[in-house]
Amino acid sequence: MSVLREIKQSAEEEVQRHLDIIRRQILKGVTRPYNEVIDLSSGDNHAAGIKPITFVRQVLAGCLYPDVLLGDTLPVDAQLRVKRLLEQCAGGSVGSYTDSSGMAHVQRNVANFISRRDGGLPADPNHVFIASGSQRAIMAILKLLPQGEGTSQTGIMVPTPCPHTLPHLLKAAGLVTVPYQLTEEMDWKVDLLQLHKVIQASRGHCSPRALFISNPGNPTGHIQSRRSIEQIICFAAEHKLLLLVDEKYQESVFGEGSEFVSYKKVLAEIGPPYSLTVELASFHSLSNGIMGECGLRAGYVELVNFDHTVLPFVETLLCRDISTPVLGQIALDIMVGPPLPGDPSYNLYTQEVESRRATLECNMDKAVDCLNTLPGFRCHPVKAGLFIYPHLTLPNAVLTQAQHLGVEAGLLYCGSLLEEEGLCVGVCECVCESSRQGSCWHIRMCVLMPSDVLEDVLCRLRSFHIRFLRGY
Amino acid sequence: MSVLREIKQSAEEEVQRHLDIIRRQILKGVTRPYNEVIDLSSGDNHAAGIKPITFVRQVLAGCLYPDVLLGDTLPVDAQLRVKRLLEQCAGGSVGSYTDSSGMAHVQRNVANFISRRDGGLPADPNHVFIASGSQRAIMAILKLLPQGEGTSQTGIMVPTPCPHTLPHLLKAAGLVTVPYQLTEEMDWKVDLLQLHKVIQASRGHCSPRALFISNPGNPTGHIQSRRSIEQIICFAAEHKLLLLVDEKYQESVFGEGSEFVSYKKVLAEIGPPYSLTVELASFHSLSNGIMGECGLRAGYVELVNFDHTVLPFVETLLCRDISTPVLGQIALDIMVGPPLPGDPSYNLYTQEVESRRATLECNMDKAVDCLNTLPGFRCHPVKAGLFIYPHLTLPNAVLTQAQHLGVEAGLLYCGSLLEEEGLCVGVCECVCESSRQGSCWHIRMCVLMPSDVLEDVLCRLRSFHIRFLRGY
């Protein structure tokens, strides 16, 4: 194929591709020791058996087929919501395009949600942009940065570890990654001294213009202290960095004393001049929100302190994506504006959401406890998000065998786990100082699933792990 | 905003932005001479009042809320379709991610559809990739082309006129556009001699590796002859060009003797060596198909003669988009596999589809006739697609006024039409030889809407046009 170029796949992508192949084989009737593979590498909770929230599905179905469903089939508040949303769709149909930055109605409701979340701090709907998932929103904002050339090429400071989907976005946007290390031993804390060193060192080969961070930590599941957020903001101000904050797990915080505080709120509390100058983009999504509707594809970004002359360009960049799926936007509307006390659907909605939270928290504890009993695994308690992110040390014999096969040791482990037990996990090499190259890894594993499914997953993982180690 | 760069907006994007502003003003209660703006620049037929196809909405609603809807609410074939589709969703929920290349089940059905369309010619589901609209599919394929540098930078031959969404995709992919002109006077024919000249001339500044073409013409609405398709294929073979064929309007062909023939079919009929070597990517979408579900976002590409080692990279590139909205994929499944004779929903489905086609054809005739009565407009009969694409010559006084205001004459016309009558049309400068720079334009106008809406649109356009010209 002479005209086409080769594209190198990352370790993550290799595992995903393997997963696709196995799934298709199973559909074709190829026999495996398991009936289906479970993809724990992404937060695909419906796939793992978590049930959708009834009110969301009622409203979506009603919007699609209002003629019939606006009879007695749906509760009154779902019917009202359908009517209100369809009034906002051109031609009264969810089959129409929306404005490139999203439905104005949904933007307004997102702004209200943000304002309530931040204790009444104002949020401007015109600074909220809806996209087909937070990834697309991140991409649009990255595209606003100039690329530059040579030593003035734009650099972006990125934590290690970072969301597994981020590196390819940065590459596609043509930006230079300037990695800074989170300290696992100190609950994934940002080391401010290191940050200063890293940005200094980067100036030789690029021009750093932005800093990315996850709050709460993704995939680490840690919660940044308010003091740490303040430090990052001051650092960004000092170096004139745009702050890109992944706040996707803001609704998934648990454990006693744990609380989500947004960067925007801390920024406002610091006061001028920071609160008026530091540019901030905060991302959230439907897939990672409490309803976990990954298949619908929607997310948003709120921009703070962006020059008003820049905003139309955000719209233009999102417009190039045509428009966000309308049903995703509608689900987002419910995520930011659930039924209120007294509404007919309030009790069921609240009960379903609380049950999900309880399952998630209970599963976290179980999974952390289980992994800590397995030789080679070390797993910190997790306070937010959907993932556990244990540290895995593999014996030298595994390293030798992997080199022999021409693959990385972490891939050998995860590939075998997928092949033998039908469990797909994320994998990332650890760069901790104490480890020899290639023997330390982190495993990323979503635990939002029904309790019995998690029991099964842990059982398969335990049995595989012991068998795998025994082989070396 | 020091860290961000300026992005120039195209004339099209300027008009779209103006449209967004006016729409938001109307929502806020600002009074205008009209209650709502009609966007004729895109094929957003639901927005213009075309009703959705009942079976599509029944199945989608059923997939979202199966517990209740799989009672008596839906016809039996819709219920069966829901069950079959949910079996293909991980965890039985449309809230799950799908494989990056789409649901295997939908890929299979698309392949069957293509095979039926092409008279039994085989189509391989593994060569069909589902994306969030044909635009995203085009982008993924463009990304397969190497960018190159200097004179070896990859060039792509692109017709003038081309789909209005294409130029920004090419730009984002970092490719050099090598334009070739379609001959309006000869029913938008491709001039083969010109094609040879253009590619020759391009070799000085880029390396042409692909040729884009719309079949049927987009936005021109013409049908290429089989002979012309053969010539293009031979030209591509001679110059080792990848053929990118937009076949979005394959289902919207009308008028006596008009017939859609796919590039793939003609390629197969030419026989070896061409049929075994010429690389071809054919695109289709839900938005432009007969059901016009723009808001759901789905499309596909079929790849022919691509090396099997390249296919995984297509998957990787699409994977970077995460996954196509599941409800869009489901609607695509219905588009390629509608109810069959004897199914309970067959009659209604067929009747709804036929009624849309009849409306479209009738509107085309009406619109062409109307515009041809207006001074300055010249409109060829249209045989396919959703748009008319008349030629508009503006008087010199308009040109002078536009220069005075620092805008283009075509924009002055379309901006005033939008402002005064609430009609948004697409606009493109014409490069016909006989025209003086800036006085000749093409207007792009979708006519798929209820007949009475079209009457109103034509009335507003006529009245505006006469008033506008009178001002000069």
Image: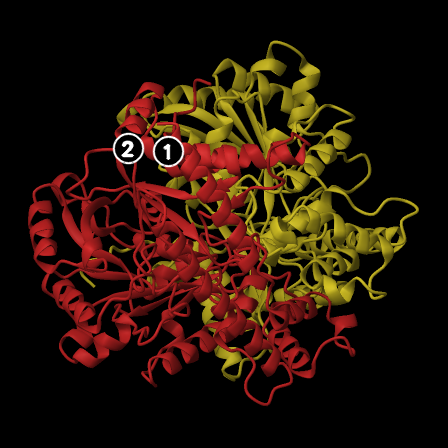
Chain colours: A yellow, B red
Q: Position of residue A101 (x, y in %)?
A: 55, 39
Secondary structure under the numbered disc 2 in the rendered image: loop
Image quadrant assignment for residue B190: bottom left
Q: Are marks 1 and 2 in contact (CB under 8 Å)?
A: yes
The amino acid on which the numbered mark 1 sits, given as a three-letter code, is: Leu
Q: Is residue A221 left or right of residue B71?
A: left
Image quadrant assignment for residue B74: bottom right
Q: Position of residue B449 (x, y in %)?
A: 52, 58
Relative to B295, say whether B114 is above or below: below
Other residues around mark 2 within 10 Å, as few (<14) / some (14–19) / many (≥20): some
Q: Is residue A28 left or right of residue A384?
A: left
Mark 1–mark 2 Cα distance, whole angstroms, equals: 8 Å
Quadrant showing the C terminus of chain B: top left
Tag 2, which chain? B
Image quadrant assignment for residue B90: bottom right
State the residue at coordinates (68%, 22%).
A266
Q: What residue would you read off at disc 2?
A: B395
Q: Is residue B455 left or right of residue A329?
A: left
Tag 1, which chain? B
Q: What residue would you read off at disc 1?
A: B469
Residue A434 in sight from this viewpoint: no
Extreme residue in the top direction: A273
Of A404 and A125, which appears nearest the observer?
A125
Relative to B17, say whether B104 is above or below: below
Q: Is residue A2 left or right of residue B111?
A: left
